[in-house]
Image (cartoon, rainbow, N blue to C red):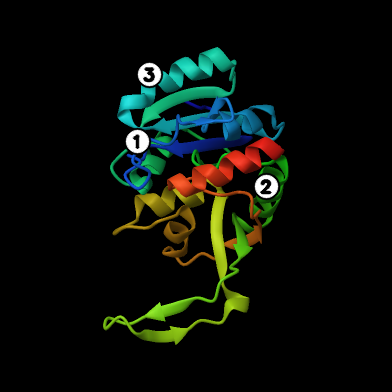
Amino acid sequence: MSESSEGVVAVVVGAGSGSRMGAEKTFLNLAGRPVIAWPVEVLQRNKNISEIVLVLHKNNVDEGRSLAAAMGWSKVKTVCAGGNLRQDSVKKGLASISDCELVLVHDAARPFLTDRLINEGIEAARSSGSAVASVPVKDTIKQMGEDGMVAATLPRSRLMAIQTPQVFRFKILKDAYASLSGEVTDDAAAVERTGLKVKLYNGDYENIKITTREDLVLAEIIAERR
């Protein structure tokens, strides 16, 4: 358990069942490395990250510990099992941290994390308390009514697709999850429900989340170029 009141602890969440993929995606091979190894390697090297917590599916905890040892990830202090929902997994990761300045949450299924995304998120969270990576949506977004017909066309200029990393002052995120009722799909939504505002900063269109087989094909192309 972390005991540092300073520094930034990264919580890498990869506890999903992979139902949409048809396979557990965290340890799928991507250009010769498990998907999770891509973002964790970047976090391991980044000078602003003091510690890493891996939250995995209960069936993969031993594999995660073995991988961390084999890869020499000295910053990985905790590997724990997640919960049924993503928010349950994040809460379990937070519970393994006694204190820190900031917590950075990143999806294990987003392999193309960069130092810029980490550093700019940390800088923004230090000034605003909360910061999430985002990119402008490219498609026109329409809201569907219960009858299956278009109910509204939303103004694209103000719509953002949210990514991870998402960075928060530790107490802000821990308190948000402690008071949360109902389901949220990202950490920012939990914080928003407390009435606090969340800063958006520039994400990266290559910072894709591997959810389907098609995503994995695109990830292979990006990985080859990198």
Q: Earlier in the sequence, mark 2 or mark 1?
A: 1
Left or right of 219 on screen, residue 62: left
Q: Where residue 138 appears, x then y in whole percent?
A: 60, 69
Per the rendering, the mark at residue 82 is 1
Q: Which residue is mark 2?
A: 117
Q: Real-space Cα distance between discs 3 and 2? A: 29 Å
Residue mark closest to the camera, 1 vs 3: 3
Do residues under tags 3 and 2 come within 8 Å of each other at their CB atoms?
Answer: no
Q: Residue at x 34, y 35 (%)?
A: 82
Q: Residue at x 37, y 58 (%)?
A: 184
Identify the secondary structure beneath mark 1.
loop
- Residue type at the position of mark 3: Asp
Identify the secondary structure beneath mark 3.
helix
Q: Where residue 56 appears, x then y in whole percent?
A: 39, 32
- Residue type at the position of mark 1: Gly
Against 198, residue 32 (above or below) is above
Q: Which residue is mark 3?
A: 62
Against 47, residue 197 (above or below) is below
Q: Where residue 180 appears, x then y in whole percent?
A: 34, 56
Q: Where residue 221 appears, x then y in whole percent?
A: 62, 42
- Residue type at the position of mark 2: Leu
